[in-house]
Amino acid sequence: DIQMTQSPSSLSASVGDRVTITCRASQGISNYLAWFQQKPGKAPKSLIYAASSLQRGVPSKFSGSGSGTDFTLTISSLQPEDFATYYCQQYNSYPLTFGGGTKVDIK
Amino acid sequence: EVQLVESGGGLVKPGGSLRLSCAASGFTFSDAWMTWVRQAPGKGLEWVGRIKSKTYGGTTDYAAPVKGRFTISRDDSKNTLSLQMNNLKTEDTAVYYCTTDVDGALNYWGQGTLVTVSS
């Protein structure tokens, strides 16, 4: 199985900050990488697929990059509605696997 | 608009069974591959299993922890996905989500249904 490692596991940031979350795969996954946002008590919401493609309706302050084993999710200017937990997920092969999550909270 | 609505969760004793359903609308369900993902309380996301469309044989794949105990099925005439869970263990306690699956990209999710396995 492909292991996905996210860092950091949590971070504190202020409104307006630029935030970067990293995800590393245990083996190469090309660009088969997605990012999700999850708020407490809610289902995950797909933000990005194919490492850098924004889902329809997702604001452009979210961006993704990377290929192979190393990937990043960047939020250009953090807003109050962005405080949530973010997960990466590989879909290069089954079983699909997720990173452990990064909780972004208010500093 | 794509909608996925799970139902069937509840409290069950260890060793018991439960059947979850997911009602789908807003897309051509019969063409869709579908996946179940679960999330234990306070934990991360875990892939449970997937079913392909009938065009691709309707075959299923499962995560190791549930293989042999869980069965995914679909009723394309009713736009419904099901998850039959047998011999439940306390570690199966989680919110279960159904999702669409486009070559592994999980684009749409239901709101989830909570399964609690406890004596």
Image (cartoon, grey):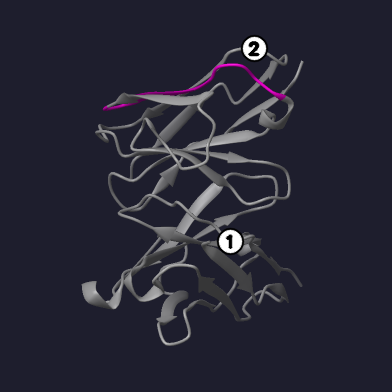
Q: Does B7 sit above or below residue A85?
A: below
Kindly identify the residue that appears in the image at 56 percent across and 65 percent down. B3
- Magenta-tinted stretch: A68-79
- Whether residue B57 can be seen here: no
**Are both tags, 1 and 2, on one chain?**
no
Side of A19 where A4 appears, left or right: left
Task: Indicate whether residue B39 is drawn in magenta.
Answer: no
Question: A17 or B90, which is in the foreground?
Answer: A17
Question: B48 or B34, which is in the foreground?
Answer: B34
Question: A14 or B72, which is in the foreground?
Answer: A14
Kindly identify the residue that appears in the image at 32 percent across and 71 percent down. B31
Residue B61: quarter of image:
bottom left
Tell me the subunit letter for badge 1: B
**Labels 1 & 2 near each other (Cβ < 8 A):** no
How far apart marks 1 and 2 lie (CA) works out to: 31 Å
Q: Does A70 sit above or below residue B61?
A: above
Disc assigned to residue B110: 1
* Crowding near the residue tagged with mark 2, few <14, some 14–19, many ≥20 C-alpha atoms within 10 Å: few
Disc assigned to residue A17: 2
| Image quarter (top left, top right, bottom left or bottom right) of the C terminus of chain B | bottom right
